[in-house]
Amino acid sequence: MKESKENIFTIFDDILQREDKESLLQQKSKVIWMTGLSGSGKTTIAKGVERYLHNNGILNQLLDGDNIRVGISNNLTFSCEDRAENIRRIAEVSRLFLNCGIVTLNCFVSPTIEIRNIAKEIVGVENFIEVYINASLETCEERDVKGLYKKARKGEIKDFTGISSPFEAPENPEIEINTSKLSIDESVQKVLDYILPIIKNK
């Protein structure tokens, strides 16, 4: 028996829900939000997590300054107002990935508790896993692969977190990783140990 045109239109008018996408992908979507000073190891750790998840059939997307600041936020500065707007945009993008059933790995300094709370409210507290990549300013300056701290010390970069702009450490992160003490492999494993039981669709 053929369905009427009215019934067909009704079916296509119904948008598939997050649960439908998660069922298709056989995973639970979450936003893993890594915060910490520039040079603390956020993106390096996220790349390790990304590779493991990919190799084990878990669809994920990594977002960091390199793919956000050159695109969706290329018109923003590093002022307090623009930082907040940058995080708002990232959170909205993350929510779209979340609703597609995709695990999102976010690597952003996101320096204040207020800014991270904005992201958490947009994404949803139940979907937000805060990871504090804890490394001292001295350690980050020693690494300084991009020479950003040197430029900030010379006044060539304004509003640079840790130098001319403050960083507020998370008060109750789900995960805290001290990269001054742990290796990259140990740090990646610590994240995986926490998130795998949550995102695997059993």
Image: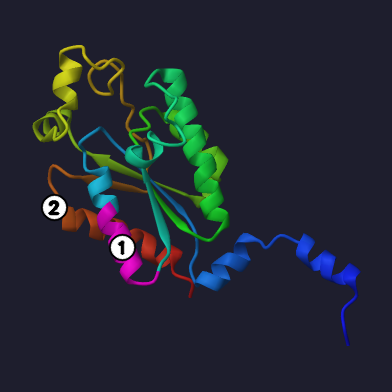
Residue 95 covered by magenta stretch: no
Q: Position of residue 61 (x, y in %)?
A: 41, 54
Residue at the image position 42 percent from the left and 19 percent from the top: 80
Residue at the image position 57 percent from the left and 71 percent from the top: 23
Q: Which of marks 1 and 2 is in front?
A: 2
Relative horizontal placement of residue 121, taking residue 133 as reference (left or right)? right
Inter-mark Cα distance, 1 to 2 = 15 Å
Relative horizontal placement of residue 44, taking residue 55 as reference (left or right)? left
Q: Which amino acid does label 2 sit on?
A: Ser
Asked if the residue under mark 2 is in contact with the one under mark 1, i.e. CB atoms within 8 Å, the reply is no
Q: How crowded is mark 2: few (under 14 residues within 10 Å), some or many (20 or more)?
A: few
Secondary structure beneath dot 1 equals helix
Q: Where is residue 111 in the image (x, y as percent from the top left)?
A: 35, 28
The answer to whether 154 is drawn above or below residue 107 in the figure is above
What secondary structure do most residues of the magenta stretch adopt? helix
Q: Position of residue 91 (x, y in %)?
A: 50, 40
Residue at the image position 90 percent from the left and 68 percent from the top: 6
Tag 2 residue = 183
Q: Give the range drawn in magenta.
A: 47-57
Residue at the image position 38 percent from the left and 60 percent from the top: 195
Where's the N terminus, which quadrant? bottom right
Tag 1 residue = 193
In the figure, residue 197 lies in which quadrant?
bottom left
N-terminal of the pair, mark 1 or mark 2, is 2
Q: Which residue lies furthest to the bottom in this view?
A: 1
Q: Which of 40 and 67 is in front in this view?
A: 67
